[in-house]
Image: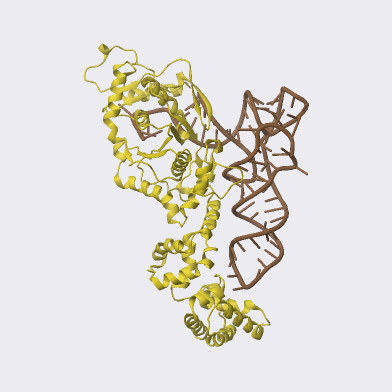
Amino acid sequence: MTVITRFPPSPTGMMHIGNARTALFNYLYARHMGGKFVIRIEDTDRARHSDEAVQVILDSLDWLGLDYDNTPESQFANKQRHIDVAHEMLAKGNAYKCYCTPEELQEMRDTMKEEGRIVAYNGKWRDKPESEAPADAPFVVRMKAPQDGHTVVSDEVQGDVKVENKQLDDMIILRSDGTPTYMLAVVVDDHDMGITHVMRGDDHLNNTFRQNVIYDLLGWDKPRYAHLPLIHGPSGGKLSKRHGSVSVEEFKNEGYLPETVNNYLLRLGWSHGDDEIISMQEAIKLFDFDGINKSAAKFDYAKLESLNAHYMVEADNDRLVDLVTPFIKQKFNIDLDEPKKKTLLAGMNGLKERAKTLVQLADEARFYIADITSYDEKAKKHLDQYLVFMLKGLKDKFKVLDNFNHDVIEAACRALAEEQAEGKLGKVMMPLRAALTGTDKSPSLFEVAEVLGKEEVIKRLDAAIEFIEK
RNA sequence: GUCCCGUUCGUCUAGGGGUCUAGGACACCGCCCUUUCACGGCGGCAACACGGGUUCAAAUCCCGUACGGGACGCCA
């Protein structure tokens, strides 16, 4: 039997990080088993549907590299089939018409809650003959759930979970306007699509019992279930905007790499011994239900950031140049032409190992691609009146260098330190750093100077000298 | 309120009766390296929610309590 898993997002206009993890796990399991991973848009609620909202989710999936094996299908498109199934259930006596009004139901729930009883539909119309039905009154169709005994769901993560059938009520499968509800639609679609494993947030665990009732009434085979614990915010409870970013789109915009997000999400609720850094290839090899944790996990932004720092160092320099380009455009409104890209590429080794996100990388890369138009406060401390001779000394030494590379630059700097600062290199380097970068932190200056080139270095030294003397 | 699920360092987790004076990672704190900031190296701080059982032996099994989360829609 081929394993088929699914990811069924509602078109909410964003890919919540929790949903992204659900998608990841479904993807991983399908790939691990050599099966299929399919997408279905849960848009039975037409009010929420919009093509743009769907596209955002597909884009996020694409960015994460979770490729799927079908053309994403719309649940709404299967509406007639859902209705047909409901009618079939009605015909077989497995469902019935209920004429209760929403107000009546609300009242029923209120009293039940007040009395501390189980809140469930009381089955008022379950056994009433058709003759008692009010003429021309609107009705909903409800499934006939078993009323005695108990039901057990064997979950791959949660184990056996038992619920008394009296807790389960006769859920509505067709609304009074004749449209199918989610409860019916998922069952029919999962069955029709041949879904073998349903992996979703454990907020759906209770629904599983109701859905299984429908499977049984229809005489269909049930899928295997795996209910994943939810992701909480740093302070417990739902991960919300208040904590920071919550959507894949936002993490992308904050400069995180897709491999970072995948790796982080994988480790949130799943583990394989002490493994921390896990590539997608390895994840596919290793992923199994065994490794899934039962308890909810809190989202930790610091760990995400540190993982990203790791993947930035691992990433190809060419790729990083491409990835950082839009951030540079956005932050500094600078378009990178070919020479600038070449400069950035040459300096990337030094830059990438101190940036934790692409946003930081853009900030740090700025001096390579734009003139120094100002010096920050800390840089100014190194551009003091009495240090101007250091810059002049550097300029004199650099001017006569033929091969302006890392090693000769270093030799020149060290020589100047010997001559002017009792060998203290820092006395020479900090003013140089301020002059070349406008700040007090940067990659190795021997490297920076080489990448910038002799002409540019001397230009910046002149500018700094002028700044001090003016 | 009713039902369901969970509870190991601040956080993510390893652990599945003895090898646990509980391991790793992130964060934090020191030290080293060093032209700055990072990286890196070394070291440190820090946890089995609580109470009962079962057992020669429990972080590991059972029960209860507490706390946390989820579900109780003509939403998905």
Q: Where is residue A91 shown, x and y percent of the image?
A: 28, 17
**In screen coordinates, is A136 left or right of A103?**
left
At a point 31% along the width and 16% down the height, the residue shown is A92
Q: Residue at x 59, y 47 (%)?
A: A275
Is A50 on the left or on the right of B23, as rendered?
A: left
- The vertical placement of A42 against A111, above or below, is below
Q: How is the image coloured?
A: by chain
- Position of the N terminus of chain A, as image quadrant, is top left
Residue A423 is left or right of residue A193, and the answer is right
Chain seen in brown: B
Determine whether B41 is above or below A437 in the image.
above
Q: Is residue A411 left or right of residue A38?
A: right
Q: Residue pushed farthest left?
A: A136
Horizontal and vertical percent position of residue A89: 32, 20
Visible in this render: residue A233?
A: no
Residue at image coords 52%, 58%: A314
Residue A240, placed above or below residue A3? below
Quadrant housing residue B19: top right
Is residue A464 among what the camera can see? yes
Residue A304 locus on image (x, y percent) = 53, 52
In the rendered picture, chain A carries what hue? yellow
Most foreground residue, A325 or A313:
A313
Rendered image quadrant of residue A139:
top left
Residue B61 appears at what percent x and percent y?
64, 27
How many marks do you count on the picture? 0
Residue A458 lies, with reference to residue A69, above or below; the image says: below
